[in-house]
Amino acid sequence: MATKQEICKNCEKEFKKGFQFCPYCGQQAKEDLTFSVLFYNTISNYFSFDARFLKSFFPLMFKPGYLAQRFIEGKRLLYLHPAQMYLFISVVFFFLLSATVVRNQVQDLDATLKKTLNKPIVSDSLKEKNLKALDSVQIDSLLKPIRENVIPGLKKEDAKALDSLIKASAYKSSNKTLMFDFEENKVDSLIALNAEDESIYKAMGMSEDAGWVTRKFYSQALKFYKQRSGGQILQSFYDTIPISLFILLPIFALILKLFFRKHGSYAHHLVFSFYFFSFLFTVFSLILLINEIIEIPDWIDWLVVMSTFFYLLVAIKRFYRQGWFLSFIKTGMTSFIYLMFVIPIALIMLSVVSFFFY
């Protein structure tokens, strides 16, 4: 006699009738979607996550290396998954960063650039006054003592020629920009005439055989010149940081792998890195929140940031089970390589990417 089968509505696989849950995907076999069911599932999932997060939060903050050690030992359901914790805390941190520091810095940068770029360093009236004064000066009379004492052979005609050359040079230099390496008047005229970008690029100094990178650079430079705003570039820089961390965090794990080759696979070091970066973002988030409520002296903020090195030291000693001296040396080398080589190179690359794609 054939047993009655049911088909799972989720994975569409058959299983024996009478099961409360699908043996393949785990969905409840018979569950009508009602408001109470929807509400219960939402609350249940939320508090399940919240409970595991609270169970993981205090060990993360006060027991360095403990969560990574427990996860490697197989205790993986009691605490929040390292990647899940990292994603959750990083989202919170970058939200706070964007709402506080980034917003203020973007506004300040835009305001500063508008004052600097839109306000000429030498006013037009003063420039015109100085040029008129220069016109009234006879270079020949100034050169007379030089001609008679220093350069006896300098003729009066040569002095007049020198007079014209100096004045022409003064007029030319007065039209040069102090902020951009091209003639702004010419570029402004082409922009006002709605000239093609290629013509403007050439006026800015781009050669005809320029490659894609050079053309992209001049395109972004022209965009910046028109907008006179650097806030978008700074905003783009901050926006690329979360994406870059998906590369920087594995590099940190790779450095750990180089110093602790005999202590598990690369995945073990990646678990440790997820929890450590989660701790860092938690500390940075708390600093941002506290400074929004009360202004803390900068030296205290830096002291808290520097203390994360000692957290890493204790975490490495506990997780890799080595002595204090050896742990201190390897922690110092890991931090030095990451901060002095990886981070600066990453910042340069982020700056270039931010300018080229803002």
Image (cartoon, grey):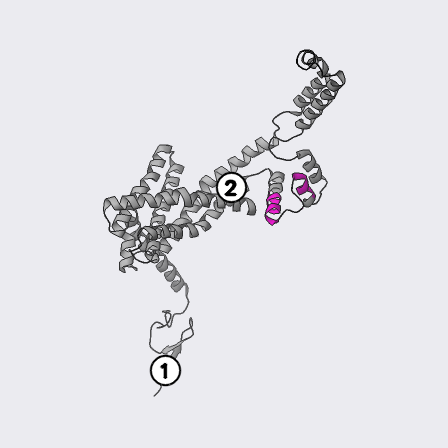
* Neighbourhood count class around disc 2 (C-alpha, 10 Å): few under 14, some 14–19, many 20 upward: many
What amino acid does circle 2 point to? Answer: Leu
Task: Give percent across and percent down for residue 18.
Answer: 33, 77
**Residue 30 figure quarter:** bottom left
Secondary structure mainly formed by the magenta segment: helix
Q: Which residues are magenta?
A: 199-220
With respect to residue 225, does 170 lie above or below? above
**Front residue (pair 215, 127):** 215
Q: Quadrant of the N terminus?
A: bottom left
Q: CA distance from mark 1 to mark 2?
A: 64 Å
Between 326 and 185, the one nearer to me in the picture: 326
Q: Is residue 137 visible?
A: no
Residue 314 lies in the magenta stretch:
no
Considering every residue shown, the one lying at the far front of the view is 153
Residue 130 can be seen, yes or no: yes
Question: Would you say 156 lies left or right of 25 here?
Answer: right
Dot placed on the residue nearer the N-terminal end, 1 or 2: 1
Front position in the image: 338 or 232:
338
> Horizontal and vertical percent for residue 357?
55, 47
Residue with the mark numbered 2: 234
> Label 1, on which residue?
4
Q: Residue at x 52, y 37 (%)?
A: 107
Q: Between 262 and 187, which is closer to the camera in this rendering? A: 262
Q: Where does the image place residue 89, in percent across and percent down from the top left?
A: 38, 49
Question: Which kind of residue does numbered mark 1 sit on?
Answer: Lys
